[in-house]
Amino acid sequence: MATTTVFDIVLFGGCGDLSLRKLMPALYRGYAEGSFDSNSRIIPTCRDAETAAGYAEILAKSLQQFLSSDEYDSAVADSFMQLVMPCALDITTVDERWKSLHKLFSKDAEQSRIFYMAVPPAIFGITCENLSQQKMINGQSRIVVEKPIGYDGVTASAINDEIARYFDEKSIFRIDHYLGKETVQNLMALRFTNVIFEQLWDAKSIDHVQISISETVGLEGRAGFYDNAGALRDMVQNHLLQLLCLVAMESPNKLDANSIRAEKLKVLEALRPLTGADVDDYTVRGQYVAGEFNGDLVPGYLEELGKPSSNTETFVAIKAHIDNWRWSKVPFYLSTGKRMKARSAKIVIQFKEVSHRVYDGSVGQMTPNQLIIKLQPGESIQLSLMTKDLTCLETKLKPVSLNLNFSDTYDNFKSDAYKRLILDVAANNPALFIHRDEVDCAWRWIDPIIEQWQQSAHTPDLYRAGSWGPSAAKTLIEQDDRYWFNGESDQ
Ligand code: BG6
C-alpha cells in the first residue's frame, strides 16, 4: 500500500505535451490510489491568461484522452481537479504574476515544494534565476529536470552549472523515466537477490547482452526538437546507457542514491571509447523512408519533417564494450529506432554454450540459455532452458521458457514511471535519478561518435518504416555469429 504524502508541485510548461500527456495522468493515478492527499497543490503554469482560465477544460479532456477507460473516473477526476491551481506566468519575465504564484504555495514551510521543468533546457537557467529572485526556493524545494540535458558535453555542463547556482546537487532530480519503470527496477531485484544470477553474471558465463528499444511512432509533432537531436541524443545518451549501467554495474553495498550512482558511474567510465574508424565499424545509423505499418502507408522521416534533406538518425545500433574484469570481451549490442515494426523494449542476456556437449547432434540444436527482460509492452521476465522433449521416445532436446508475466502475477498490474518518480521526488528519494557526473560521463562517450558522424561522408542508412531497421544493423551483429532477438530477420 502506498504511503500518503503531501506536496506542492509547479509544472513549468503546464500546457505542454509532457504535462498533459504524461505528468497530469501520473498525478491523477497517484491521487486516485491515495498516494498523496488533498492538501497537495498542483500548479501548472501557462504563458497566457486565457489558457490558464480555460485550463480545467483542457485538463479534463486530456485526462480522458490519456488515461485508459478503466482508470478514468469522473468523480475522482473532479476531486483531483480541485487540487489543480493554474497560474498564468511567462517564466522568462519578472512581473506581478510571480506574486500570484507565490500565493498558491502552502503556508507550511515544511511542505515539499517541487519545481518541475517541463520546458526547453534553454530556459532552465532563467527560470531558476527568477525563482531565486522571487525568494521561492526554500529548504524543502527540489527541482526536476527533464532530458535532454544539453546537446553535447559542453552544453550539458553549462545547463548543469546554471542550475547549480540556485540548487545544490541534493535538490536536483534529473529524471530518466526509464528508471521509473517497474521492470527496470526489477532488474536490480533480480540481480541482487537471486544467487543463481549473481554467480553467472559475468564474462565467464555470458556471451553477450542486447538492449533494444523499438518504437512504432514517428515524430509525434516534435519535428523541431527531434531533427536537432536524433536517436543517439534522444535515446542512447540517457535511456539505453542507464539500462546498460543497471545490467553491468557491481552490486551497490546499499540501495541508497550515492551507492547506486557510484556503481553506475564506474560502468560509464569503463565504456570503451568509440572514436575515428571504430565509430564506422561499431555503429550504424539509419533514417526511415515511407513504408507500411499495420497495413497503412506511413510517410518517411523527411516527409514528416517537411524538409528535402536531413542527416538526422532515427535509428542507431552500437556494439559497445565495457573494459573491466567482469565484462571483458562481452559485447553489449544497443539499438533503438522510430517507426519500427513493433513497439518493444527489452534486455536480452545471452549465456554461453555449455562447455562440453554430452549429447550428440541427433538430439537437435542446443540453444544457449537466454534471460529476456521485457520492459514493454507486457512486462515480463523469461528464462529459456533446454529440456528433453517429453513427447518423443528417443532423446530429443527442446528449448522451453520459464515465464514470469507480471500481469498474471499481479492483478491489474499497471506501472506509471512518471507517477513513481514524482512520488520519489516528493519523498526526497533521489536513488532513481541521475547525478551530474553520470550526465557528463555519458556525454563524454557520446560526443566522439557524433563528431565522427559529422565528419564522415557517409549518410544514415535508409530503412522502410514498419521494418526492423537498416540491414547494416543486422550485419553488425551477424558478422559476430550472433542474432538480434525477435523478428530481426525480417529486415
Ligand atoms: C523519450 C524520447 O525520452 O522517450 C521519445 O524523447 C521517446 O522520443 C520516448 O518516444 C519513449 O518512451 P517510452 O516510455 O514510450 O518508451
Image (cartoon, rainbow, N blue to C red):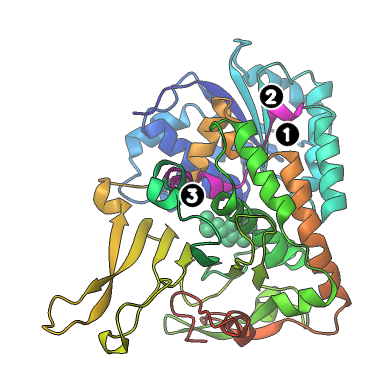
Q: At label 1, which amino acid type do we have?
A: Leu
Q: Which residues are magenta?
A: 168-189
- Disc 1 and disc 3: Cα gap in Å? 37 Å
Is 182 included in the stretch rendered in magenta?
A: yes
Q: At label 3, which amino acid type do we have?
A: Val
Q: At x 84% / y 22%, what residue is drawn?
A: 133
Decide whether the magenta segment is chiefly helix, strand or loop: helix
Residue 265: horizontal and vertical position, in percent?
69, 45
Quadrant showing the N terminus: top left
- Give the answer, above or below, for where 206 lies relative to 254: below
Residue 271: horizontal and vertical position, in percent?
71, 58
Is 376 included in the stretch rendered in magenta?
A: no
Residue 67: horizontal and vertical position, in percent?
41, 49
Q: At x 33% / y 50%, what residue is drawn?
A: 69
- Disc 2 and disc 3: Cα gap in Å? 36 Å
Q: Is residue 74 shown left or right of residue 394?
A: right
Residue 376 in view of the camera: no
Q: Earlier in the sequence, mark 2 or mark 1?
A: 1
Of tags 1 and 3, the one toward the viewer is 3
- Disc 2 and disc 1: Cα gap in Å? 8 Å
Residue 487: horizontal and vertical position, in percent?
44, 80
Q: Which mark is residue 101?
A: 2
In what element is the residue under mark 3? helix
Q: Do callouts 2 and 1 mark residues in contact (Cβ within 8 Å)?
A: yes
Q: How many marks?
A: 3
Ligand 1 quadrant?
bottom right
In what element is the residue under mark 2? helix
Q: At x 42% / y 31%, what residue is drawn?
A: 31
Q: Which mark is residue 89?
A: 1
Front one among 470 and 131: 470
Q: Earlier in the sequence, mark 1 or mark 3?
A: 1
Q: Which residue is mark 3?
A: 184
